[in-house]
Image: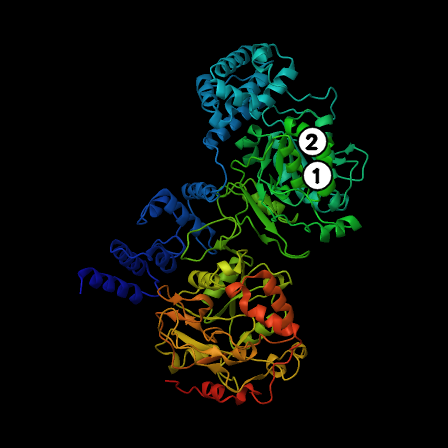
Amino acid sequence: MPSEIIQARAAFADLQATQPAQSPAERQRIDAALRQLEALGAQDVPRVRRELLGPSGLPQADDAPLEMSALMQLPTPATQSSGRAALRHMAAPCSSSVSDEVGTLVAQTVADLYPDLPRAPLSDLQITLAQQIASFSAAPTAPPADIQTLLARLDRLADPDARFLGLGLGLILVTIWGQTQPELAQRLATWAADRIKELSPDHRTAFNQATAPRMAWMKLQASGLPHAKILKEIFEDSPLPTLPSETVLKAENSLYDTIITVFSCAPYLETRIPALRDGWLRLLKDLGIPYVIIVGNGDGRLDGDVLHLDAPDDYEGLPQKTLAAIAWVRDHSDFAHMYKIDDDCFVNAPLLFNSLNYRASDYYGRKLRRGLAQTDRIWHQQKSASDRGKFDLDKSPEPSSYADGGSGYALSRRAMDAALDAAQSPEGQRLIETSFMEDKMLGDLLSLRGIHVDETDYRTTIRRRSFGAATPVAFWQNSFMPSKSAPVMQAHMDTHEGQQEDLARLDHHGLWPRKIWPSYQNVTLGYQSNALELITSEASVAAAAEAEIAVVACMRNEMFMLPHFLAHYRKLGATAFLIADNVSDDGTREYLAEQPDVALFSVDTDYKLSRYGVAWQQAMMAAVRPGKWSLVADADELLVWQEDQRESLPELLASDAFKDADAARLFMLDMYPEGRLESADFASGDPFAEAGFCDRTPFLSTWHGRGPFSNMPTWTSALRHRLIEGARPDLFVAQKIALLRYQPWMRLSAGLHFVGDVTLSKRELIFAHFKYNADFRRKARAEVARRQHFNDAEEYRKYLALTSEGRDRIFDPDLSVAWRDSPFIQSVLRGEDRA
């Protein structure tokens, strides 16, 4: 035998012998074995490391703070690898604290996990300069300590790659110092003029369209300062927006030069708006940035911080309200930029405005792209009150790119002019008439004038409610709330609640909400990330980790079976549930969150991209239950193994049948009622009494395949083959290896129908499978529409075809028996050895 195989076998034996690792010495032994396996070329070491040593993959004590020196001891100490290990650790429930140095590394890693966003090449320098210029603005009579360093920093941002932002900042400084330090202002004006004259013809053309210097020049020229004369000739070929002669609001801060418009409506002035005033809006005072609350059905008056526009105040009127708000800012203020945000958001204002990216853009926000047939034409209907809103379709054009209104966006004064001008054109009028989505309408109007959205470094988090009273969860843009470790600029929360908590976290290292990922994949954020977000407390996870037996499940819209599911397993002795909810919209998530013995996660990834739920089940077992018994069950699967069911599940696992086992086979027994399916509504609270029948011969062994690991015979459902005649013999596998003491070397298949590298117990068990009931037709329709189950929901499509033919009775007097009377089931209940 080759020496490498001998060494690998010895290292693997060390891993197995040290389970579960408790002491520092055992952890070091595991680490040494993993390093040896990695040196020998084992490909799966990173996953096993995470599962055996915790999310950081380091052999440290569970309560030890994570230090940078420890991260550098990882076998591959590249910054990206270390940063992702630190992020996985910091995000995990019940993880220990981290040093500030590690927190800063995590912040860099979070930024890297927005790979589709354009990155400002000198983003740190932009923030440094913004903070420096803000201090100059606060004390304009104090000269800078080092003008040469300041000029060097401006010069690094004065080229096309930085979108000439340095030149714009230089002109802002001329405006700030024009009155208080005229010589310094003159020097900066001369520097800017010389720097512009040095531009090549191509760069000069780009400069003439650049937003940052154009908006800064607009304000400098309006100031009447004599230093503007040096630059007038340079800018004379660059037309500028016109500022109003009289203003209701005037920009006092030359650096940010922005007004915030918070879109709300009259009913929310007493609920959402007070929460925002006590939340992120408080950050604006220190920045010197004003805001107004936008509501409709008014006369244009500004009452305190509430602007009552002469525009509709309902959902379908948002396009008109948006244009009215833009017109008001343009005509009644002199701000160079406006930032539109909704009243159910949280904004990391210091990061957003100090990054300065919005100052380099006419139109800045989270870009949405709609190709042909990708626009949801009926999104507005359920939110609308008028007949037009309820019944008309959105007919706006495709393809289209625009800034997501729910994530906020900034407009320069040039973009304000362009949008309002386009709105008056025949093409613009047609857009307005056919559009219900105000954000898409605005993007389409701006595209008529050649202005397109820029999203440089605009990191966002999106949380949504799946129905009116639902708990908001991560959706589409799955990320963290803003903090020192999460440089996220804006979070759509879909509620006004949580503002003060989010505000308090802003200046601290940490990641909220807590998340875990399947251990086999790297951490990712955004769309289809497979990130499981913790909904309940961290204490619920700690309790699940200590439970003798935990039930692990993935669910979506299971309120029909859920109460029966929980009651059944509690009766069997289960004291903890680990459940991943896949964005339910029937109250399942909210019901589970109220249960004291449930540790609940939410995941927004498509079910079919999760190995049909196994990725999420594996993530929860690997993170919370390694080496401990877990039962993986669907909401319609109720475990039985004895006729009178006197023995508890912990007692079963302590029996001789499980002495040397780490898994058990469960037969999925399809149960159904004697009458019509609609009769089995389980109102009695006893699914066994209402749907207690099965086929006399419930399982087939006609398929000779032995699974993906070639280690097990295959049993299929006789009932489903009876219902769907002519189906392939390999369909409807009716077994699961669903009771297991999870270890990282186990190989799980989709659906857990087969598992590799396990020792099965002598005792086989039964899942009473209550798929066929009063809820069956609804579920079949829903799953066919969602197309998330195996082979494009093939089985559900066939079921739906059957039910459409009026076949709502499964019971057959020649084939059906009470489930306990099936000879096969009797043999399992007696614990007979099938071998």
Q: Quadrant of the N terminus?
A: bottom left
Q: Is residue 775 visible?
A: no
Taking depth in this image into account, of 124 and 442 the one nearest to the observer is 442
What residue is pinned by disc 2? 422
Q: Amino acid under label 2?
A: Ala
Q: Residue at x 24, y 64 (%)?
A: 9
Q: Quadrant of the C terminus?
A: bottom left
Taking depth in this image into account, of 303 and 113 the one nearest to the observer is 113
| Placement of 162 over or under 103, stated as above or below | above
Label 2 Cα neighbours within 10 Å, binned few <14 / some 14-19 / many ≥20 = many
**Quadrant housing residue 260:** top right
SS state under label 1: helix
Q: Residue at x 38, y 44 (%)?
A: 80
Q: Which mark is residue 40?
A: none
Residue lying farthest to the front in this orientation: 726
- Check contact, mark 2 vs mark 1: CB within 8 A: yes
Q: Residue at x 75, y 21 (%)?
A: 246
Residue lying farthest to the right in this orientation: 299
Taking depth in this image into account, of 171 and 628 the one nearest to the observer is 171
The image shows residue 353 at horizontal and vertical percentages of: 57, 32
Q: Residue at x 22, y 62 (%)?
A: 5
Q: Is residue 235 visible?
A: yes
The image shows residue 154 at horizontal and vertical percentages of: 48, 22
3D distance between C-alphas at marks 2 and 1: 10 Å
The image shows residue 439 at horizontal and vertical percentages of: 66, 40
Q: Which mark is residue 431?
A: 1
Q: Amino acid under label 1?
A: Leu
Label 1 Cα neighbours within 10 Å, binned few <14 / some 14-19 / many ≥20 = many
The image shows residue 355 at horizontal and vertical percentages of: 53, 32
The answer to whether 262 appears left or right of 599 in the picture is right
The answer to whether 377 appears left or right of 124 in the picture is right
